[in-house]
Image (spheres, rainbow, N blue to C red):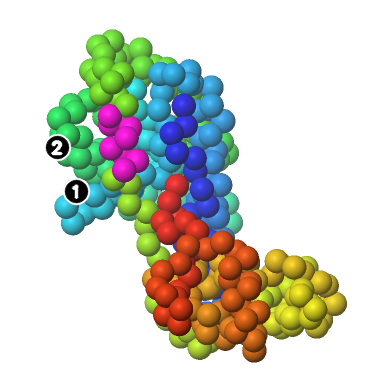
Amino acid sequence: MIVNERTIPIKIQKSEVLLRRIPENHWKRAEIVSDLAKRWAGFRGEQAVDFPLSKLPEKDYLIFHGIRLSNGKYSFQIDTLILTAFFALILEVKNYAGTLYFDPILDQLIQTNPNGEVKGYANPIEQARQQQIELEKWLKKRNIFIPIEFLIIISKPSTIIQTAPGYMKMLQKVLHVQFLLSRIEKISSSYKKEIISSKELKKVCRALLKEHTPETFDPLQFYKILSNEILTGALCDKCQSTLPLERHYGTWFCPKCQTKDKNAHIRAINDYFLLNNDPSISNQQFREFLHLSSASIAKKLLISMNLPFKGHYKDRVYLPHNLNQGKT
Ligand SMILES: [Zn+2]
């Protein structure tokens, strides 16, 4: 059973908004485009495990996506966590193409791209081992002692996996996605003793969801972009022009492609919330962002969105519907 669905990571959502709201010739554009391509590829790689996992019996396997927990100061995130009454399994998914060489001496992963480019990465086996240690600590604090396994999943079937002779044992934890299901079945058959009762399992499940703290990301700070560089206004969904839409007779109007759009302010306010780390908006900020001159029209639009709010009269600020942005 999927306990929490995988959602588009907050870093992707926020970077997409940032890209839409900086000028065409902005000096950071190429960097954001390149980061986004990597993040989307990583996300699609993670999705590759969904099909094999959907074949597992629902009642016996609890599946968590992108759970982020903390042991005091240190936070750790697990791409996919599978929990059963017998064992827990961490999946670390990698979408690398070409040839992967696991270097046991330098404890590094070396990728040779299909175009011959060579790149080095931290060893994902070590990464997963750290997650295993942290999860073990986290569960121990809650008096749960369950064996924790981990696997590194290579999401592209064409990727070639290699290591030095004599180190093949190291690769037992690394496998292509098409072998995931049979590997889980094999792991499952090796654990015959039920460690936690179904009641306890439910308790752990609740604790995992309750203590999951979504990642935060400040796109402006990350890319060192000033808030006055951000393009304001409601934007056209059809022609992708960066010209602000105009308010004409109760609707939004694109000066470039002449499209009318009743809901452009909803997308705009969503962008505003995603770009601000402590998201709230006053009537005046809304007017400035949407290029509206009338406070009463701004108020009407704000009220029509049924946003939560705090404060009275002039101090009132509106908040996003889902305060836990990025929560999966
Ligand atoms: Zn347009």
> How many residues crowd around disc 2 within 10 Å: few (fewer than 14), some, or many (20 or more)?
few
Task: Name the one closer to the observer, 145 or 325.
Answer: 325
Residue at the outermost top position = 192
Residue 141 shows which numbered tag? Answer: 2
Segment tinted magenta in the rendering: 203-210
Q: Is residue 262 visible?
A: yes
Write down the residue under mark 1.
Answer: 71
Q: Position of residue 284 (x, y in %)?
A: 52, 84
Q: Which is the main secondary structure of the residues drawn in magenta? A: helix
Q: Position of residue 76 (x, y in %)?
A: 28, 49
Q: CA distance from mark 2 to mark 1?
A: 9 Å
Q: Is residue 262 above or below residue 155?
A: below
Q: Is residue 133 left or right of residue 118?
A: left
Quarter of the image where one finds residue 217? bottom left
- Disc tally is 2
Ligand 1 within 8 Å, label 1 CB? no
Instruction: Please report the residue visible at 33 percent of the width from the left and 52 percent of the height from the top.
Output: 213
Q: Contact (CB < 8 A) between labels 2 and 1?
A: yes
Q: Position of residue 113 (x, y in %)?
A: 53, 53
